[in-house]
Amino acid sequence: MSAGEPRARRLVEARLGRPPQDALEAAVVLEAWAGVPAQRALETARGLMPATPAEPLVSAAAPATVKCPPGLALEGAAFLVTVVAIALWAEPLSAALGVDAVERALRIALPLTVALQSALHVRHLGRPSGLTGLADRGGALVGAAFAIVVVLALALGQPGLLAGLLTVTWTGGTILIRRGWALAYCVPVLAAVPILLTGAPALIVVAAVAVETALGVAWALRTTATGTAAPGRWSRTFGAGLCGGGVGLLLVADPSVSWATGAAAALALLPSATGALWAGRYLWKLVGAFPHALAGLPACAVQVHPAPRGGQPARASTGDPAPRRGSDGGDGLRSPLATVLVALARYVALTAVGSAVLLALAPLGEGVGVLAAFGAVALATLLVGLLESLGRPSVAAVGVAAGLAGLVLVRLVGLPFPGAAMLAGGTLALVVLVPGVLVLLVRPARTLATSLWIP
């Protein structure tokens, strides 16, 4: 031991009130309280540690109880209300602008909207800082909304203009709902339904809703408290946007599913959307399930413990689960894998019941095939979001790419029934996404050690 190490040890123990648990903890104290340069602090801290590591201690702290963010149910209800309302826009818009124009507009607006929503979620909305990162950018967002409308209108004419207005409305609605201003979004969208049905100029009505939404976003951000924001990385943001656009393409690239001839397609999306919202709400339990699953485990990956003299051979700690509390710990938490399986069971049950009710109350021309297709794509969307939250955007991207490849393949071969291409795409996406999720959940320690972040 060098001459300075006894002084360093006394300093560290005085500041901590106990001996250091590891070299990193000691190095932080030396750097923060004694001004020791980082490299030298690490070298000195290593000298303070015993040559023979101590037996790892199990965690004695109980994981904190995790609750869903307030307003999550309201966000889901607002989304469902606007889906129904905008579904009722389809027929009057088609009567005023033509089925082909509305179909083209929707096939542009939906993928673009999902891409922008996904990018915003990863960059700001899903981060702990939330809307804080956008608080001073209301004017820039209004300018971007105007640019989207103008560019699409100049490039595609009337369909492009309608696509731009719908994109602004849907994307801006996401920000308003996250701000807690769901009524400011839902009321104009709902009010537009009877106005359109009376034969009012369709584009003027849609433009009015888009302008109201854009101005509402500007005001919502202006009244948002500013502070320190930690936005997501641009690489993650760009990847999330691509995945979102791919999911949007899965929804609109099947020519056998028409979005412009009535409300049938949008209404067929309701059961799976409702199931996804219910399952997504349950998935918030993963925030507590991961640390709960690791309670009582050593904080080392692999460590060989030397045997005492005359004792048993050395053993290795591999991070495998040690004996601990019951599977739910008495606090309602399950293992990460069980949490996701319960969420998927909820999704399947509610989607199946909702589809049966929808078929009984309002028989759809497209039938069961379209409902199954929407169910597969909605489940794939849920898993894409989960994988991105767990820091595996590459797996999510591969799943979306596989889905698009399956959709294109079925379109080339031929469509045996309405929704067949979409169903094939959603199913192939699930073939990739489900194993990807399961691999992460069966090893919670490894997943938590990487960039785990549940938005």
Image: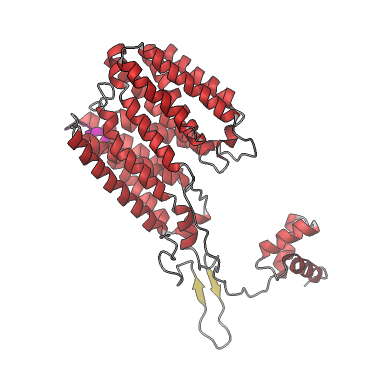
User: Extreme right residue here?
Assistant: 3
249 vs 66, nearest the viewer: 66
The part of the image, by quadrant, that contains residue 413 is top left
52 vs 198, nearest the viewer: 198
Instruction: Examine the rendered structure and indicate whether residue 448 appears above or below residue 19.
Output: above
The part of the image, by quadrant, that contains residue 209 is top left
Q: State the residue at coordinates (78%, 70%).
A: 10
Q: State the residue at coordinates (37%, 20%).
A: 192
Q: Which residues are magenta?
A: 417-422
Instruction: Examine the rendered structure and indicate whether residue 411 appears above or below residue 315.
Output: above
Task: Say which quadrant the N terminus sits in.
Answer: bottom right
Left or right: residue 32 compared with residue 174: right
User: Extreme bottom residue here?
Assistant: 310
The part of the image, by quadrant, that contains residue 98 is top left
Give percent across and percent down for residue 206.
Answer: 40, 17
Instruction: Examine the rendered structure and indicate whether residue 336 appears above or below residue 123.
Output: below
216 vs 431, nearest the viewer: 216
Q: Is residue 394 visible?
A: no
Specify the color scheme: secondary structure
Give percent across and percent down for residue 328.
Answer: 41, 64
Q: Is residue 400 visible?
A: yes
Give percent across and percent down for residue 245.
Answer: 40, 31
Left or right: residue 419 compared with residue 201: left
Instruction: Based on the picture, tell me whether residue 420 belongs to the magenta stretch.
Output: yes
Give percent across and percent down for residue 100.
Answer: 28, 16
Q: Give the total of numbered labels.
A: 0
Q: State the residue at coordinates (76%, 60%).
A: 30
Q: State the residue at coordinates (40%, 42%).
A: 384
Instruction: Based on the picture, tell me whether residue 280 belongs to the magenta stretch.
Output: no
Left or right: residue 20 compared with residue 439: right
